[in-house]
Amino acid sequence: MSKKLVCDCNRSMPLDPKELGLPIHTALCRQEVGQFLNALNESEPIVVACTQERALFSELATQAEKPLVAPLKFVNIREMAGWSKNATEAHPKIKALLSVTDLPEPDPVPIVDYHSDGRILIIGPGEQALYWAEQLGQSLEVNVLSTEPSPLPTGRSYPVFTGKMTSLEGYLGRFIAKWELNNPIDPEMCTRCGACVAVCPENAIDLSFQIDLDKCKSHRACVTACAGIGAINFDRVERSREGEFDLILDLQTNPSIQISQKPQGYFAPGSDRFKQSMAASQLLGMVGEFEKPKYFVYTEKICAHGRNGKVGCSACIDVCSTQAIQSVFKDGQGKVEVNPNLCMGCGACATVCPSGAMRYNFPSVAYQGRQIKALAQTYLSTIAVSY
């Protein structure tokens, strides 16, 4: 059993120690914090019936001389029961919520790994994209895809591409970006020497080193001036470009990924400077090794997605907010494949699956059953005693 520390949050909850069978604190996070510190020196696991001050109690636990016998557990009894309209009758519910903490830890689930080296692609109008490239360049491996021309920096400390995005897919550590070069000047080949700027009779080329095709009269003087480099080609056939990146900062008005749940490592703050700053701050912390649970279990043999070359159920594909689920057919037999790196664990697929082929697994169905059983048994037994 664990040691449960219950606080009525400065008497804002009508808690009865006799009803709960536990002592009630009034200011556990302030004047009575010594009670928590004393509990750290005991041999029982600790449960704190407060989630608001989780950070405070966790920090105090890390500073304690004696290591914890088990990780701290926190239960929200305030918003879940103590501040409800029927707060005076909430003791059975509070006891039930606390009882779940005495269950053994759920079985471990598989882990999904991410690896990021900090290779970032900043997509958007040149002026904005180049600004953030300068800000992030000291910490991240910066690449810029300028969708609107802007004067380029004098130093060539990071790649600058130009063009229009055609597709973007992936997740933290593995984004595949594809774009199409839409100007005769290829910025990857251009040396920024300025020879083309000097010879253009229409002033159609500026320090963005892109040709304004509305001004250009096709004299091709720029082509002659760049003959030794070959960066200018009005008849270029191969315009497709692609690259692999760990992170994406998308500053376009119409972002490349327009789903409700964006993949890890992708930020689309648009043109809002405050949102751009917040995104940049988060991006700086997304370098290294990361992991998360694998949230689902899929049983192919009971899946009703497809038979004999025909699609049957596609409920999970239709409902997935991250587009993590794809249809796969082989020899007439259909199944679905879930990309665990894109899955965010919302559980919608398991909710709509008619056959049980897709199940939420964090925690497992069996463990959730044990939680519900503990809640129900404690609640009903408390009600029986009360009445």
Image: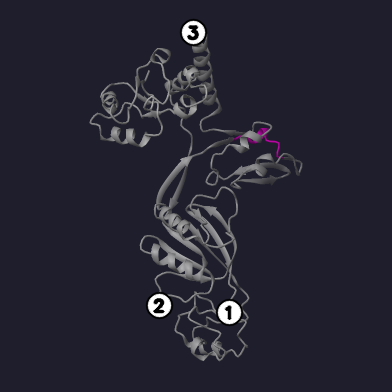
Q: Earlier in the sequence, mark 3 or mark 1?
A: 1
Instruction: Give the crowd class for mark 3: few <14, some 14-19, many >=20 residues within 10 Å.
Output: few
Mark 1 — residue? Answer: 184
Residue furthest out toward the left: 65
Q: How is the image coloured?
A: one colour
Disc 1 residue type (three-letter): Pro
Magenta region:
298-305
| Disc number placed over residue 154 in the picture, else none | 2
Work out whether 19 lies above or below 115: above
Q: Quadrant of the N terminus?
A: top left
Q: Estimate the spatial distance between the alpha carbons at disc 3 and disc 2, rounded to whole Å.
A: 80 Å
Q: Nearer the viewer, residue 319 or 82?
A: 82
Q: Secondary structure at mark 2?
A: loop
Secondary structure beneath disc 3? helix
Q: Mark 1 and mark 2 in contact? Answer it, CB < 8 Å.
A: no
What label sits on residue 385 in the rendered view? 3
User: Where is residue 78, by image quadrant?
Assistant: top left
Q: Is residue 158 above or below residue 81?
A: below
- Residue drawn at x 66%, y 43% is 317
Q: Badge 1 local density, few (<14 within 10 Å), some, or many (20+)?
A: some
Label 3 sits on what residue type? Val
Q: Amino acid at mark 2?
A: Thr
Question: Gap in Å between the C-alphas at discs 1 and 2?
Answer: 21 Å
Q: For the residues marked 3 and 1, what is the alpha-carbon distance in whole angstroms?
A: 83 Å
Q: Earlier in the sequence, mark 3 or mark 2?
A: 2
Q: Is residue 246 visible?
A: no
